């Protein structure tokens, strides 16, 4: 191989590496599971604090929230979750630091969701539409709950595991598991394995080859249970 060909090859490799790095920086971890039309609607810059301060201003907006289930109740036509807000890490998994909570909110799911599958203490990540506020009681005081309609729900295992779980494809959910690999450039990353279907609808997670990336899978739909550490594949 002559010098010019070698330089050209190095240049192509640099472009590929920089493109991969850019993709990682801009990746929305749940986009591997979210339907494309829902991906485009999620306003990631809108925080829970923003909505809590002025719920009416954000009515109809689609946002991403995490939290811990405090109560779940099956109503006539939907399931109501009372959730303690928790911040999300870079993989959209709730961080179990209750002192960082900014309050409570209510989330309603129209599709059947058995309260037994989301007992108190369950960590969740959801994409939901802000529908306003609901006045209720919090011990001996009145409390105004930010209220959302669930569009996409991920139920995390009770105990964090040393491997990642994948998220649901609305309105279905399940637990998916992945194995971790070491890459000298990126460090540890996650590759998907077969999920264990849990709850309504079942699940299937499409494995991808090492070096592939969720962005390359746009347009392909999968029925399974928020983009977790499984979305860090190269």
Image (cartoon, rainbow, N blue to C red):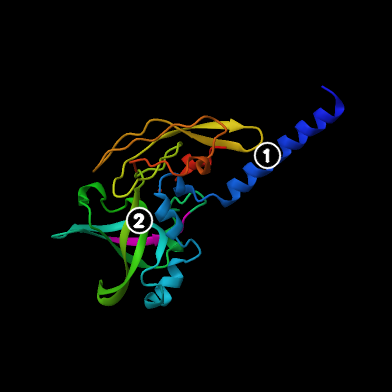
Question: Residue 128: percent from the left, percent from the top?
Answer: 35, 60
Number of residue marks? 2
Count neighbours of disc 1 (C-alpha within 10 A) and say few if under 14, some if 14 to 19, many if 20 or more: few
> Where on the picture, by quarter, is residue 18?
top right
Left or right placement of residue 169 versus residue 214 in this view: left
> Element at badge 2?
strand
Question: Residue 89: percent from the left, percent from the top?
Answer: 50, 52
Quick check: is 220 in the magenta stretch? no
Residue at position x 65%, y 44% in the image: 19
> Element at badge 1?
helix
Count neighbours of disc 2 (C-alpha within 10 A) and say few if under 14, some if 14 to 19, many if 20 or more: many
Residue range corresponding to the magenta coloring: 82-88
**Cβ atoms under marks 1 and 2 closer than 8 Å:** no
Question: Residue 119: percent from the left, percent from the top?
Answer: 25, 51
Q: Residue 209 or 141: which is nearer the viewer? A: 209
Residue at position x 41%, y 62% in the image: 63
Q: Name the residue under label 2.
A: 68
Q: Name the residue under label 1.
A: 17
Residue at position x 72%, y 36% in the image: 12
């Amino acid at each position: 191989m002559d010098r010019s060909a070698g330089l050209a090859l190095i240049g192509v490799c640099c472009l590929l590496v920089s493109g991969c790095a850019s993709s990682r920086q801009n990746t929305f971890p749940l986009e591997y599971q979210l339907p494309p039309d829902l991906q485009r609607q999620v306003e990631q810059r809108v925080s829970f604090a923003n909505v809590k301060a002025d719920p009416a201003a954000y009515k109809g907006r689609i946002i991403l929230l995490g939290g811990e289930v405090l109560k779940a109740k099956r109503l006539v036509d939907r399931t109501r979750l009372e959730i303690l807000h928790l911040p999300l890490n870079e993989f959209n998994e709730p961080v179990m630091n209750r002192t960082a909570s900014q309050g409570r909110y209510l989330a309603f799911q129209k599709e059947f969701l058995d309260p037994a599958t989301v007992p108190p203490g369950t960590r969740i990540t959801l994409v939901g539409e802000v529908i306003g506020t609901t006045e209720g009681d919090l011990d001996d005081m009145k409390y105004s709950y930010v209220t959302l309609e669930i569009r996409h729900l991920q139920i995390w295992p009770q105990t964090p595991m040393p491997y990642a779980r994948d998220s649901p494809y609305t309105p279905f959910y399940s637990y998916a598991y992945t194995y971790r690999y070491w890459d000298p450039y990126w460090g540890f990353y996650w590759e998907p394995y077969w999920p264990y279907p849990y709850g309504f609808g079942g699940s299937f997670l499409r494995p991808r080859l090492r070096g592939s990336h969720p962005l390359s899978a746009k347009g392909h739909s999968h029925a399974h249970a928020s983009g977790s550490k499984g979305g860090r594949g190269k």
